[in-house]
Amino acid sequence: MSDSRTELSNLGEFGLIDRISSHFSLKNRSSLKGIGDDAAVIDAGDDVILLSTDMLVEGIHFDLSYMPLQHLGYKAVTVNVSDIAAMNGKPEQVVVALGLSNRFSVEAIDALYDGIRAACANYGVDLVGGDTTASSSGLIISISVVGRTKKGSEVYRSGAKDKDIICVTGDLGGAYIGLQILEREKEVFLANPSMQPELEKHEYAVGRQLRPKARMDIIHELADLGIRPTSMIDVSDGLASELFHLSKNSRIGVHIFEDKIPIDQDAFNTAVEFKLDPFTCALNGGEDYELLFTIRQEDFEKLKNHADIHFIGYVHPDPKQNVLITKGGATVPLKAQGWKHF
Amino acid sequence: MSDSRTELSNLGEFGLIDRISSHFSLKNRSSLKGIGDDAAVIDAGDDVILLSTDMLVEGIHFDLSYMPLQHLGYKAVTVNVSDIAAMNGKPEQVVVALGLSNRFSVEAIDALYDGIRAACANYGVDLVGGDTTASSSGLIISISVVGRTKKGSEVYRSGAKDKDIICVTGDLGGAYIGLQILEREKEVFLANPSMQPELEKHEYAVGRQLRPKARMDIIHELADLGIRPTSMIDVSDGLASELFHLSKNSRIGVHIFEDKIPIDQDAFNTAVEFKLDPFTCALNGGEDYELLFTIRQEDFEKLKNHADIHFIGYVHPDPKQNVLITKGGATVPLKAQGWKHF
C-alpha cells in the first residue's frame, strides 16, 4: 500500500466496483456469474441460484423522521427482490442482518419485522436467517436474497442485440419526486412543529418513495407469454444510469424517445410545482424499482397492448451511440447522473 | 403496535432472535432449514446450499485503532466461512456489502479488499457480488456466504445423542485474552502516545483476536476419515453459550470436564497476568472460531490421536443436566454469559 491518499469521491461508486472486481476472479465451477449484474448466478443442477445483497443505512438511504419502520422493512426486502426480478428469477429466501442502537425499543423492531414479514408474504419469500448486532450510531439493514430460475432462463445485462426494443415498466421519477416532498415537509415541520404535513395531494409520489414494489408481476406475465427478455436490469439508480449499464454490458447503443418515457401525471404536476423538470426526474431519479429490459422485435406483438409496459426506444449497434431524441426532435447525447453518496 | 416501550436489553440477542423467528414460518419447498442454526439450508438437487450472514460494525466488533484493515477484511470472511464449516459444508461464494464514510481513502479500501481476497483465496471462495454505500458514521461490513454439501451430509445443532462424545478443536479463550491486551495497550497509548505497544510477548493471543482462522481443515479431515459429527456449531460467542445451543437444539445435557478444556499456555499466562481466570475466558470469551461438535462413541478410535481435537465431555440424556466438572472434582451448573451488545 502506498502512502498517497486518493479520495473515494474521485472514483465514485461504479469506479470503486470496477476497481474491486478487477482484483477478483472466479475459481469455483459453481460460480457461473460474479460481480457485474443484478445478482450473482450459482449452479444448482437443473436450476441456477441467484444471489444478491443490498444494504440500507440510516441517514443515507432513509430518514426515520418520515419513513415508518414498517415501510422501511418492506422496502428493504423489495429492493433485494427487485434484483432477482431483474435476472428473470423468483425470489425464495432472504437473510436479514440488522445493526441497532439501544434507542430502538422491542416494539420498534417488531414494526420493522412486520414490514419484512408483509414483504416476504407478498413476494413468496422465506426469512431463513440473519444476524442482529448493536450499532453505535444509526440503523443498518443489510439483506441478502436467494432466487432461482431454470438454467438458461436467467437474463443478464449483456444480451441486448441490434434492433431490440427497449421496454420499461410502470412509471419513472415518482420516487425521487416523493423524496423531494418528504424533505420539504420535514423542513417545514422543523421550522414550525405545529404545521401539519401536506402529503395527501402528493400521495402517489410519496407512496413511490415509501412503499416501492418489485415487479414480480411482470416477470410472471413475461413467462406466461413465453417471452424471455434479451437483457434486463432494475431501475434503482435512474433510467439513464441503467441504460448505460445495458450499453456497456451488451456493447450496444440505445436510442431513447423522450416523449415515450412514462411519467405519472400527478408526479409530473408535483415536479413542476417544485420547479423540477419531470423528464430529468424520470431519467436520473432512481429508486423506482421498475424493470428496464430489451425484447426481440418478434416479441413486440405479444406485448404491444400491455397497459404497464412502455416502449421507449431501440437498440443501435454502436455502443457509443447512446442518445435521447427530445420532444422537439433533437438528438442529444444521453447523460447519467446516477447517485453520488461519497 | 402498542404504546408501551420494552428495552432491547430486556430481551437480549437470543431473546430477540426467538421473538423474530416465532413470527416467521417456511413456505417454499426449497427452504429445508431456516432460522436457528449456523446457516440456512436450501435444496439444490443432489446438494444442499448453505446460506449465512454476519455483520461487523465499527465500534462494536472492531476498533480500527488496533485492527489493521487487511486483517479486518480477512476476519470478516473468516467468521462467515466458519458458519459454513459448522454445517459440515464447503464455502463457495460470498457477497460483501460495505458501508463507508469519506474518511476512508481508496487506499484504505484496497487494504480491506486485500484481506478479503487473501481469505477468499485461502478458503477457496469466490467474491461474486456486493453493495457499496456511504455510511454517516463508522465502517460496516456485512457479508453473506453460500456453501454447499451433498444432501444428507449437512450437520445441525440438533443431532447430538446420549453418550456422544463432545469435541472441540484448537484452543479457547485466546481471542478474548488478545482483545484485553489490545484494549490495555490502546489505553496506555492514549495516555502516553510516545509509549510503544508491548504486543510481541502476547503474540499468540493478539493473533487469535486479529487473525482468526475458520477450521475448514478439520471439516476436510473429518470427511477423509469418514466421520460425520452428530451435531456441530462454531465457537463465536463462547464455549458455554454454544454448549447451551447444542443442549437446547438436541434436547440433551452436556457434562464438561474443566481440565479437558484446551487453553494455549501463552494465553493462559497472559490471562493470569491480567488477573483473569483462564477457564472463564475459555468458557465465555468468544471469537475463537473453533468447532464444537459431537461424535458417536464408535468414531472415537479414529480421532483419539488427533493433535488438534480435544474431548471435553459427553452427552447426557437429560437436557437440564448441563454441568461442569471442576478440576477439584465438584459438579457445578454450567453458566453462559454470551455477549451483551444491547
Image: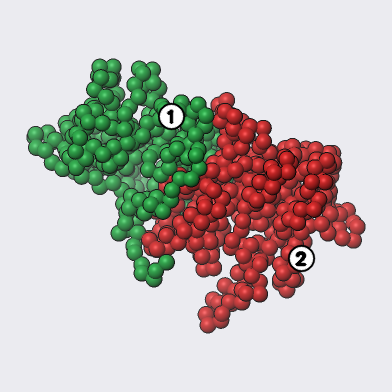
Chain colours: A red, B green
Disc 1 sits on a residue from what chain?
A: B
- State left or right for residue A235 relative to residue B139: right
Residue closest to the eye, A237 or A124: A124
Q: Position of residue A5 (x, y in %)?
A: 58, 45
Q: Position of residue B83 (x, y in %)?
A: 40, 36
Can residue B216 be seen here? Answer: no
Crowd around label 1: few <14 · some 14–19 · many ≥20 (10 Å): many
Q: Nearer the viewer, mark 1 or mark 2?
A: 1
Q: Position of residue A1 (x, y in %)?
A: 54, 37
- C-alpha gap between disc 1 and disc 2: 54 Å
Q: Which residue is mark 1?
A: B89
Disc 2 sits on a residue from what chain?
A: A
User: Which quadrant holds residue A150?
Assistant: top right
Q: Amino acid at mark 2?
A: Asp
Q: Residue at x 29, y 24 (%)?
A: B308
Secondary structure at numbered mark 1: loop
Please tell me whether residue A263 is drawn above or below residue A1 in the rendered image: below
Residue closest to the eye, B192 or B188: B188
Q: Which residue is mark 2?
A: A277
Q: Residue at x 36, y 67 (%)?
A: B5
Q: Quadrant of the N terminus of chain B?
A: bottom left
- State left or right for residue B154 relative to residue B314: right
Q: Amino acid at mark 1?
A: Gly
Q: Residue at x 78, y 57 (%)?
A: A261
- State left or right for residue A30 relative to residue A230: left
